[in-house]
Amino acid sequence: MKNVISFKTIFLPIATSFVFALLVIPNMSYAQFGSCSEYGPMAFESGGYCHCMSGYVMGEGVLGGSYCISDDQACKDQYGYNAKSNYTGGCECSYGYVFGTNMFGDEQCVDADNVCDDKYGYGSEYDSLSGSCECSYGYVWGDNGQCITDDQACKDQLGIHSRSTYGDQCQCSYGYIIENGKCTYGDTVCSNDHGIYALYNSLSNKCECDDGYTFDDDLQCVKKHNSAYFTLLDISDNGDELLVQSQHDYQNYIIEYGVGCWDYAIETYEGLSLVINMGTDFSVDMFDYLVLPNHDQNCSIMSVEWTSNDSFSTYTYTPPVQEYIPSPTPTYTPEPTPVTETYSETEATNGDGEDVVNDVNYTEEEGVVEQQPPEETNPSQEEVEPTEVPRFKEGLISKFINFIKSFF
């Protein structure tokens, strides 16, 4: 019994191997040489039908007709070169591609970016991680569901004079500010809010007034008034005039003020500072205003006069008068006329035998000639002659003759 070989021991393993060969290897060989060879080397017959091996499907051959082709090739034949098998019996598109429609209307694996561009605009792109379309860098979703630029989104929101900044923020272009939800020309906004003399400063981003203008209490740009401090030096006796000194150039002024300021209030400023509103110029004149800051009083200025005095007690005003002084007229005074002495021919002799000279007798005609006031004449134009010829020479000769006779 030990030497007898059991049939079961010899043939059972051989039978098992043969069954396995019939299921796998022999079928391939049979397909190559059997009736299914027309479907390609990957076709085999089973149950009276031809089948394709695993990983292959019945498709169309290169020369036409049915043929066992790979799953990938089958997907490419159906959806284009960028399709592939998912190995679960279906097809999928390669990385960066999605199912779409080609120019002929056929469903194909097309470039995903092109699909996003067609659907959401040129600013969109395909995100393979999320498998969806998104807006490219610098683009955002617009109100119309399209990818638009950041600047365009700002323009849609604030108007054409807006632009995008870093951080996806919108701001107005240079010279424009937001007014009623839109970017409006800054000068127009400032003029509407503060008057025609207002303008927009792009550097400070606020409204300002033109040169020579300033904001009033109502924030309107009005002509600027130039104010300066003055020291009240003295008050006139009648209280209508003030002597003030500029704290800028130290010039003294006599100011006559009008209504609006009370005397009792002005008196409290003597020796202190008050304000003169000089209007739009830089000089003190009758169009300016006197301001008492501590009493909230303003009064007009009636007249202004410069002075060098420091108080009214030393101030005297003498109007300039041109005095007429005639040129001096020369006068002529004639020389006095001498009186001529006359003697009688008979000589008187005294007791001593001496001759006595008689007194000179004057007649009315020989008396002192009355001197008439000289006429005012110009000696350079007319020669003045005496009224009577002097006779003093004749008297001297007579005295000399009598003196000679006395020796004989």
Image: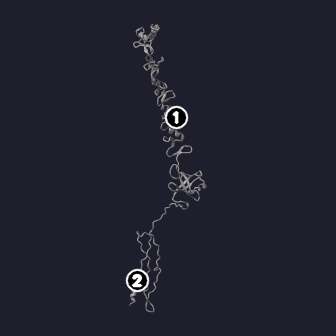
Q: Which residue lies furthest to the bottom in this view?
A: 352
Q: Is residue 231 visible in the rendered structure shown here?
A: yes
What amino acid type is highlighted by mark number 1? Lys
Q: Position of residue 185 (x, y in %)?
A: 50, 37
Residue at left offset 39%, top offset 85%: 400
| Rendered view: 37 above or below 104 | above
* Residue 9, horizontal then vertical, whole percent: 46, 9
Percent x, y for residue 334? 44, 74
Per the rendering, the mark at residue 396 is 2
Q: In this view, does 218 lie above or below 89?
A: below
Q: In which quarter of the image is the C terminus?
A: bottom left
Q: Mark 1 or mark 2, which is nearer the start of the sequence?
A: 1
Determine the secondary structure under disc 2: helix
Residue for point 40% across, 83% down: 396
Identify the amino acid type marked 2.
Answer: Leu
What residue sits right under mark 1 in the picture?
182
The one of 101 and 270 positioned closer to us in this rendering: 101
* Horizontal and vertical percent position of residue 84: 45, 19
Total numbered labels? 2
| Residue sticking out furthest to the front | 2
Position of 66 relative to 185 (above/below): above
